[in-house]
Amino acid sequence: MIVFAIANYAITQSVWTTVVNTVICAVLIQVGYFVAVLFMVWRHGASGKHAGNASSDEPALTEGGKPKGKASPLSGVGRSRLP
């Protein structure tokens, strides 16, 4: 945003125009980010419906037989005292 504002000011030589254009740019970036996140959530939800016949009661296993999504403990690292 700073680079955009500096370039805009160099082109227009107007502080007011630079502020307005920078605010418009910031709003457009935020809207684009929001739409992209919504699309990724929608796509993930759509692919989850067709995941197959995996039972939700049994965790999916990796090739090593460990549950998918579970972190394996690191050797030499103690457990946290927090619950």
Image (cartoon, grey):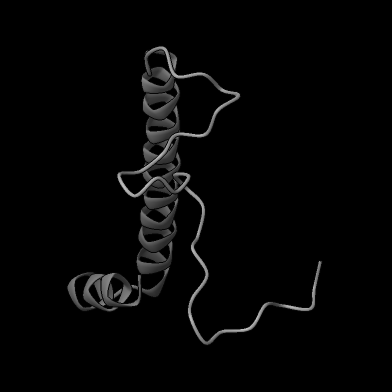
At a point 48% along the width and 45% down the height, the residue shown is 67
At a point 41% along the width and 39% down the height, the residue shown is 61
Across and down, in percent, residue 47 comes to: 36, 21
Is 64 rendered above or below residue 80? above
Q: Would you identify the image quadrant in which residue 57 lies?
A: top right
**43 and 63: which is toward the camera:** 63
Left/right of residue 31 with respect to residue 56 in the rendered view: left
Image quarter hosting the C terminus: bottom right
**76 and 44: which is toward the camera:** 76
Is 26 rendered above or below residue 62? below
**16 and 60: which is toward the camera:** 60
Across and down, in percent, residue 46 comes to: 40, 18
Across and down, in percent, residue 19 comes to: 43, 66
Is 60 rendered above or below residue 64? above
At a point 35% along the width and 43% down the height, the residue shown is 62
Q: Residue furthest front?
A: 65
Q: Residue furthest bottom?
A: 76
At a point 28% along the width and 79% down the height, the residue shown is 6
**5 and 58: which is toward the camera:** 58
Across and down, in percent, residue 81 comes to: 79, 78
Image quarter hosting the N terminus: bottom left
